[in-house]
Every structure is written in C-alpha cells, then in structure tokens.
Image (spheres, helix red, strand yellow):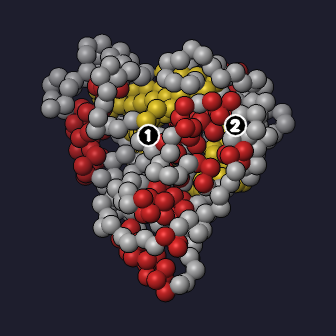
Amino acid sequence: MAARTTPAVALVASRLIRAAAGETRRKVSECHLPSRKLAPPTFTSQRRRRHTKVFATSAALPENSHLKAHPLFQLKTGAFSIHDFELVVDTIDLQNGVAPVKIVRPKSEDAVLDMYVELGRLDHDPYWAALWPSSIALAREVASASKRDVVKNKHVCDLGAGLGLAGMAAAMAGAQSVTFYDREPLALQCCLLSAEANGLNVLRVDGDTEKLGFVVTRGKTDTEGAGSIPEGGEDDDGAKEKDEEDDAKDDVAKQSKRTDVSALMFDWNAVPVGQPKFDLVLACDVLYEKHAVLPVALLVPQLTTEKKGTWLLADPPNRAPKNREEFIALVTRNDDRKMKLVNEPKPVVITHRGSTDTVLLLEFQTEDDRYLYECS
C-alpha cells in the first residue's frame, strides 16, 4: 500500500504537542500520508503504547490454529508483534456470485502509525491496516464473471498486499495458488489469518507442498470462531452470509478449497535471483509516489509469465494521474513492447462505510508469446 493524503508531519507534530501537554490521545480519522518521508520525532517512553490494547496470543491465533507453527508468525516489526494489536474481522461482499470474504485487520490504523513513530520508521506506511476503496474495487473485479478465465486455476500474486483483499478474492474465485507479497510482516500475518478464517490451504513457505492441514467445509476451517477476534461488521453494500448459498457460490467455494495460499516478505527494490513468475499480478494503490513508478514497472517482466500473463491494477483517478500515465508508457512503450493495456482504464464507484469513491481499474496483458520487454 502506498501513502495517502493528510500531512503526516502535521499529524505527528500534533501528537507530540498533545503528549507534552498531558492531553489524552484523540482519535485521528481518515489520516492519509502524501509522502513517507517524515522528520524524526521525539517520542516519550511514558506514552509507549498507551492507547493499544495488548491481547494474549490466543486472540490473534485461535487456540487450535495451525498458524502457530508458521515461520512468518515468528517475525516482528521492531519489538512489536501482531499480538500487540486489537484485531477485528470485516466481511466484504464480493458480489458476482462469490461468497463474502473475511478480512482480519488491526482495529486501529492509528495504533499502527504510532508503532512506526515509536520505532523511528517514518518511511513505513501504516495504512496497510485499513481497507481502501481500491482494494474493494479490485477484489470485486477479480471475482467478476468477466475475469473468471483470468483467475481460475491460475497462479496469482498480490503485490504490496496490505490486508490482501484482492488476493483473497482470487482465492475465493478459484485460483490455484495465491502469494501475498509485502515488506511488512504484520500485514502478511493478517493475510494468513484471513486465509485461515476463509478456509484456505496455507503453505508454510511459497511452493511448499506440506499444507497446514485445515478441515475445510464450505470455505471455513475447523478453527473458525475459536478465537476472540470480534466481527467488524458487514460492509455498507450489505454483505450478508446466508445459510444457503446459490449454486454459483457453491461452485466457487469448492474451487477455493483447493487454493494454496502463501505469504512472503518482498522488497520491490531488491528482487531476488530466481524470482517466481505468476499468471496474474494484482496491485492496489502502488502508484501514489513518483519514485515507486519505475520499480513497479520493472517488476512486470520479473513477476509475469511470458505467455498470457496479466496485471490488474486499481488506482484512484485524481491522486497521481501523471504517475499512472508514466507507468502505462513504461509497460507499453516502443515497438518491442510485450504488454498491452486492455481497453481504457475503467472507472468503478465504490461505497463503503458511508464513503463513495471512484477507482480506476487497469488491465495489462502479455501481447504475444515472446519474452517480455525489459525496462532500462
């Protein structure tokens, strides 16, 4: 996930002033960052995690969760683990005959921001902890009938996954495998908690054939409901789980049982040798910052299969249009281009929790069977 729109420097300064004055923390809503470059603040130890409810391990991981053995859950961000945050579960309606998907997230992205401030990691983006319109728009596009052939039985990457809603939608829509990439281990842990909540097969590592052994029934695991993560509520479009789903949902649920899910730390500025490639790459809000455009464009040949590879991107129309134009030019440029933009970017209106936003959806496909271009 990328940076947002309210000045983070002012936000941090406000918090420090209030801390010095001894005032209680106020709730910051809709706080977005324009840039991830912030001046280091001075943060008092007396204010350390004052606002965050610390849960026992069983809150994040139900008592009989197989994820306890997953190596990813041994990682921390500084001294913090996912168990230091109060977690909730949102239910998002994917529409298109696909069952709603459950997303586990920190209750307060404000708490995640404070963690980064306290650690002095002011180039890190805390807003992976929120569900944004772009992720909902892309998730519904992935679940739509028009994209069924692009998703079903394919190997999918959710790039800069955040909470992983788009990748989770691909899994629920019948992808063969879904790999979540993000540089933040806490985000990836939320992705795997969501995978468990939705009854998917979680792999210990990417490509591992040893699954963690879920008993799957209609997209649910035997661990569901065993923990204390509260439901965050249905989305405002009216997501409701029904006791009896229609035949289309039953078919998709059967497909999702076979989906393998993995999560890996990933830095798009340091792609490893032997990087795996995918049939479909999903990305939300990755073009906010100008310095990210070229690295993301360079990923196209590194992440995409040479034959019939597809990228689906979701991007707000007015936040950084020049960045989007530059990205399109990079991935479709010159006579030797191997990726093409399929139609014009498609505007989609998303209403979620009282807010209505427009999101642009972009689709790129491998143009022919030759090797992909290389950016220079």
**In this picture, residue 178 sits left or right of residue 10:** right
The three-letter code of the residue at mark 2 reads Ala
On residue 309, the disc is none
Question: In what element is the residue under mark 1?
Answer: strand
Q: Is residue 197 left or right of residue 124?
A: right
Q: Is residue 109 visible?
A: yes
Residue in the picture at 30% in, 53% down: 289
Mark with earlier residue (1, 2): 1
Looking at the picture, tell me which residue is in the foreground, 306 or 89.
89
Tell me if 112 is positioned left or right of 220 in this view: left
Under circle 2, the secondary element is: helix
Q: Residue 197 has which mark?
A: 2
Q: Depth check: 316 or 76 in front?
A: 76
**Does 248 sit above or below residue 284?**
above
| Residue 310 at x, y percent in the picture | 40, 26
* Residue 225, image quadrant: top right
Outermost bottom residue: 21
Q: Is residue 209 above or below residue 328?
A: above
Mark 1, residue position? 182
Q: Taking the image as drawn, is residue 153 in sight? A: no
In 3D space, how far apart are the residues under numbered discs 1 and 2 (Cα atoms)?
20 Å
Which residue is located at x 38 percent, y 68 percent?
Answer: 8
**Residue located 49% across and 59% down the image:** 115
Q: Residue furthest right?
A: 243
x and y percentages locating residue 313 in the rendered image: 41, 39
The image position of residue 81, as x and y in percent, is: 56, 48
Observer-nearest of 350 and 298: 298
51 up-or-down from 126: above or below: below
